[in-house]
Amino acid sequence: MTFSLRYTVISRKGGRSVHNLGTVFSFEVIRSLKKKSFWITAMAFPIIIVVIFAIIFFSNQATNKAAENTKNQHFNVVVTDVSGIVSPQLLKAIGATTSTDKDQGIADVAQGKIDAYFYYPADIATQKVQVYAKDVGLFDNSRYQAVASMLLQQSVARKVDAQTKAILQNTVGYDAVTYKDGSVYNGFSQIIAPGIFLVLFYILIVMFGNQMLTSTTEEKENRVIEMILTTIKARTLIIGKILSLVVLALVQVCAILAPIIIIYLLFRHQLALPNINLTNIPLDPLRIGIGAALFACSFMLFTGLLVAIGAAVPTAKEAGGFFGVVMIFLFGPLYAVTLFISAPDSTLVKVLSFFPFTAPIPLMLRNAVGNLSMPGALLGIVILAVSATIVLAIAIRLFRYGALEYSKRLSLTTIFHKKDTAIIRR
Amino acid sequence: MSTTAPTLVSIDHFRMDFGKTTVVKDLSFSVRRGETFGLLGANGSGKTTTIRALLGIYQPTGGQLLINGQPYTVDGNVKLGYLPEERGLYKKETVLSVMIYFGRLKGMSKRAAENWSRSYLERVSLLDKATTRIDRLSGGQQQKIQLGVTIMNNPELLILDEPTKGFDPVNRRLLMTIIEEHQQAGATVIFVTHQMEEVERLCDRIILLKDGTASAYGTIADVKRHYNGASLDDIFVTIYGDQSEGGAQRA
């Protein structure tokens, strides 16, 4: 049997490159989408969110139930009130009796004659209220203190007017309106739209960084590199892989956001979540545009950096060792987050904002909170874009040099000293 | 094969240094269109380096390596089928997806690549493994897939670097049959090997490399005549006898 099946060959050079880019892109995307690990990673985040919401929901329910139970419980309580604050009517209402003998009260609790004994000292501002009670379990023991506290609060509340009571209980509502440049300006709501890019960047790098790092080690580990490099250009392969990572990252984001949005829409009231009216979120096109540009350049820079590291080392395992270093550069500036907001003109903030490998978080954060000037934003975008281009070019060069280094890491000498090295031509 | 056929591959004063080590000193030879050419030599003699430089994987230190009168580029002045010495496939992918991927990279449409792959898998009795992950195949089955990927674009230039290395007798026979089919279809074959029996069976001309230069070059008859009618096996021992590694490999 001979193999003479006729087929169409894409012959034009430009057409062939686009065809190969598309082929690499679709191969990488489809095989990643078929992997269980991709979906496990994608679903891990929303599952964690669901679990957290579930814990909050059930915890709230349990707390409310416990509070209700506590309110309705009648202890066999003896109280000594030296302070004179606690209302006798309240004590009567909960079935408590009073005593002046502290030692007797403690002894009665110890002997199991009564459930609890509360001792209110003369000056509760400087002395502690003492609660002695029968053990009813680690969690249920807190009910005694809750009742002792409730007696104090309600006793004081009875002595003051409604407004003083609201102040003391910190239930006064505030409606603040701030102005900037003659218009109403809500600083926090202004953060939301441009701040989304910061959150998106954080999630993508944390969840996708490792895949970026190992995307170029596979060809080496599987010894498939020679067949690949004699079939397509290294540049086509790398760009195809990066584009596929971008699309996979977007799929990941959708997989993360979809359940969160669904949970919010369906269970907002049960979870006591705030009512977010999207129409009230201010949309500043300039800040959103800057945020998008910073996000795109930052993403390309760090994708290129992680791909470059992967290309320079022989195995995925070895590549993994560098991930922590990249993360320190990237997310280390978060420790100075208050500085970015309160002192944007400080030297440290400027250095972190314009050094390419630390710039993404400070620049996106400052853009979100509104203290990044237009020249600063443009400078940041240019620095990130140029750095991304350089890093990407280095990544391709590293891939070419490291292609046949199956067992050792590339040294800087190998990469930059052409004369001493046989290099790959394309 | 006509002795007047045009040259497809020409290597002229090729030199290759790795740092201070010279692997190929000064190598010149040509391969005619439609010819089956044997590139022979002991380990370290520069065979694989020559092939890698010819295919643009290495930048030569000196000289010219041309295919169809031009340095090889993936954009294609020739339809190439290359079976490298270092072999492998995407192990966690299925047989069919890998074959279609390479077929697409070689310019085939998806349908053509799939049809070709299924026909090939049927021929090598692996059609039932089309959707099996490659790392779940035996070593011999993986070799068959590797071979299929190499020839799936009906190459006009087939470069096989130690193709029988690690092949079991069944796959070796399959390989020989496939090479003969491509010979008959007019393909040019460059065959890097230690196996003298295969060289005698398939090659029109050969070159024997030693220490980065050509020790012998010409038709098999010419080379034998030069060594007083000795067999290729004996000629190999004569040339590389002092290189135990090569002798061991050949054995």
Image (spheres, grey):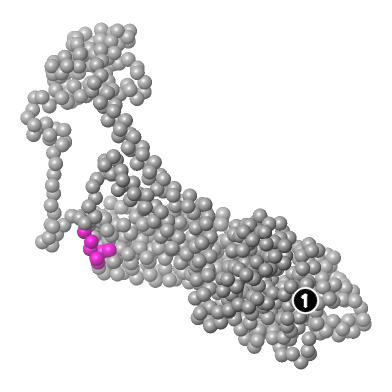
Place of residue B175 in the rendered image (x, y in percent of width and height, measured from the top left): 76, 70
Task: Say which quadrant the C terminus of chain A sits in.
Answer: bottom right
- For this orientation, the residue located farthest to the bottom is B4
Residue in the image at 25% along x and 7% along y: A104
Lateral position of residue A256 relative to residue A144, left or right: right
Place of residue B37 in the rendered image (x, y in percent of width and height, measured from the top left): 77, 80
- Quarter of the image where one finds residue A388: bottom left
The amino acid beneath tag 1 is Glu
Place of residue A234 in the rendered image (x, y in percent of width and height, measured from the top left): 55, 72
> Magenta part of the protein: which range?
A282-288
Q: Is residue A404 visible?
A: no
Q: Is residue A247 magenta?
A: no
Residue in the image at 45% along x and 56% along y: A208
Q: Dot 1 corresponds to which residue? A: B180
Q: Nearer the viewer, residue A95 or A396?
A: A95
Q: Mark 1: which secondary structure?
A: helix
Q: Nearer the viewer, residue A420 or A311?
A: A311
